[in-house]
Image (tube, helix red, strand yellow):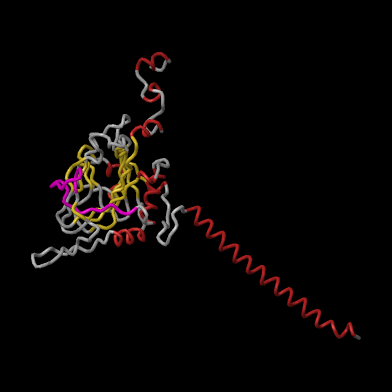
Amino acid sequence: MAKETNKPAAVAGAKEMETWNMMQMLAFTIFGALIATLVSARYSNPVAGPHAPVHALEASNVKILSFDPFIAHISNFVSEAERKHLLELGSVRPFVPYTSTSKTNPCISPLLTSSTVAGAPSTLRTSSTAFLPPSDPVVAALALRAAAFQGFLDPLDIDVQITSYNPGQEYKHHYDWYPSATPAGKNRLSTFFAILKSSCRDCGTEFPFFNATLHSQYTSAWCDVLDCTKELLTSLNVEGSALFWINLNPDGSGRRDMYHAGLPAAGGEKVGLNIWSEIDVGEVVKRGLFGGWSRKWWRPEEEWLEAVGLA
């Protein structure tokens, strides 16, 4: 009889243990999923923080405009959330015309200052600019993105500068490369110019040494990123997109055909992002970014082709 009396209690205990085991399994499953998510996010995005990048570049986003020199258009290079953060970081306010009664110009933030050329004010460049802090998570993410795009360059060699054009402001034709390497032996290997926001007309980036009249004849899709009404290669300001180009020759000297201009902001404003890869010129050659070690493989000459029976 004692056994019969204790049977319900034993059954209840077994059910309680079964329920407890199921709760443990559920808890461990949830905890494991959380850890897996955190680990995945950490290693898929090396830049931690609340403003970490939410997207990665895809091959379909890149459209080549020119093979030599290399110029490409990259769509969705800067996400909408990143653009908003960068505008706040640079404190770029909507344009308000300056009046003599204003104590300060409300469209210029403390971070932004008048642009310079070679460290000095110039009528060539009338915008306002600011180098953004590399410690900021979004700035760091963009530097990492730009470095990875170019074959895993060092993100520490990437400079990120916000540039704000009020109506009528411009950057006349110029080069991004330095006439000679810096004391550290560096020069600007490449440039990304991304659009954070734009409300102006006819205010893209113009490359006067490139004829773009045939792009739209092959496919009208180019007219989504290029100004198809112009003979010269001129980009449209597509928010979030970027142009990328190479500034240097194989020997580290500047390419003279990479002359370009930020056209005047007509009837509106433009806020862009300059992302420059300032790299040791010697590294450009050593890494084989423009070819291999051997000159004959790098740029085979006619005599060599004859010697191997290829001429």
Magenta stretch contains residue 84: no
Describe residue 39's horizontal placement relative to residue 295 as left or right: right
Q: At 20% from the left edge and 45% from the top edge, which residue is drawn? A: 119
Residue 221 visible: no
Percent x, y of residue 272: 26, 53
Q: Is residue 220 above or below residue 14?
A: above
Query: Quadrant location of residue 278?
Result: top left
Closer to us: 202 or 97: 97
| Picture mark count | 0
Describe residue 113's horizontal placement relative to residue 82 as left or right: left
Query: Quadrant location of residue 93?
Result: bottom left
Describe residue 212's horizontal placement relative to residue 168 as left or right: right
Q: At 75% from the left edge and 77% from the top edge, which residue is drawn? A: 15
Closer to us: 101 or 1: 101
Describe residue 71's horizontal placement relative to residue 173 as left or right: right
Q: Is residue 28 above or below residue 247?
A: below
Q: Is residue 297 above or below residue 103?
A: above
Over which residues does the magenta segment extend? 116-133
Magenta stretch contains residue 130: yes
Percent x, y of residue 72: 33, 43
Furthest residue to the right? 1
